[in-house]
Image (spheres, rainbow, N blue to C red):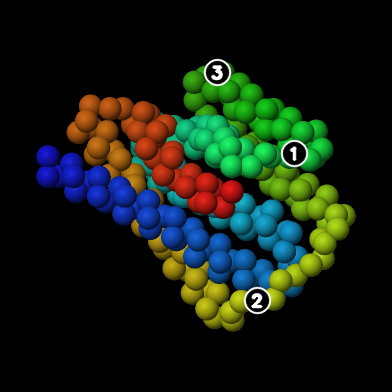
Amino acid sequence: MIELVIQIVLLIVGFAILIKGSDIFVSGSSNIATILKIPTLIVGLTIVAFGTSAPEAAVSISSSIQGSNALAVSNVIGSNIFNILGIIGVCALLKELKLGENVLNKDMPFLLIVSLLVVGFILLSWDLTRIEGIVLLILIIGYTAHLVYTSKKSKGADFVEKPKFGIGRSIVYVVVGLAAIILGAQLVVNSSSYIAMACGMSETLVGLTIVAIGTSLPELVTS
């Protein structure tokens, strides 16, 4: 019982380190981008967007390396469900959300297509191969490049914020942030796996619920 309580505390600590590490990493990376005169809009579409997803990526990658594939996949699926239903639901509850034409005509169809593609990959062999992983990575790189290209044509695309601090401090932020993300992910994976076994739950259930919600907190705060 004492060990279970310790693991729950470690899980909470892991989430806290993950979230703070993600925040520090985004701050450092964004500041380096502004020093390099990269437009604020581009920074938001790339560094900030990927940085807030760093907890999910770190936990899933760490889980996959350790052989906990159920936790890795369920975390991603659960996080996306929470993002779409939970975060959008909370935002819409607080204030009506107005969607632009690009979201309805481009982003939503792309989300639907890639979701169906992943389902199709899984149904083919109940597995995801390296080739299918490469296809998915090519799609995200292409989609991000498309977003950056089209955003350059919009108003304010050339606006660059002033750096908040120097390059040395920025690099320290990036390194510390990455270290915190890795450490937090390790704590979350180990603790959640122990909790799952101790409570007679599957890693899939833990990944879909506790881990998914915990790693989605940066998106909730950002939204």
Q: Residue at x 72, y 64 (%)?
A: 40
Q: CA distance from mark 2 to mark 1?
A: 31 Å
The answer to whether 12 is drawn above or below residue 47 in the figure is above
Q: Which residue is mark 1?
A: 99
SS at mark 1 in the image: loop
Badge 3 local density, few (<14 within 10 Å), some, or many (20+)? few
Residue 139 percent coordinates (x, y) = 69, 39
Q: CA distance from mark 1 to mark 3?
A: 33 Å
Q: Residue at x 74, y 59 (%)?
A: 41
Q: Which residue is mark 3?
A: 123
Q: Is residue 128 left or right of residue 205?
A: right
Badge 2 local density, few (<14 within 10 Å), some, or many (20+)? some
Q: In this orientation, does residue 143 appear?
A: yes
Q: Which residue is mark 2?
A: 163
Q: Amino acid at mark 2?
A: Pro
SS at mark 3 in the image: helix
Which numbered disc flags the more N-terminal residue, 2 or 1? 1
- Determine the image quadrant of residue 140: top right
Q: Amino acid at mark 1?
A: Leu
Residue 105 percent coordinates (x, y) = 80, 33
Q: In this orientation, does residue 178 appear?
A: no
- Determine the image quadrant of residue 74: top left
Badge 1 local density, few (<14 within 10 Å), some, or many (20+)? few
SS at mark 2 in the image: loop
Of marks 2 and 1, the one in the foreground: 1
Which numbered disc flags the more N-terminal residue, 1 or 3? 1
Residue 145 percent coordinates (x, y) = 75, 50
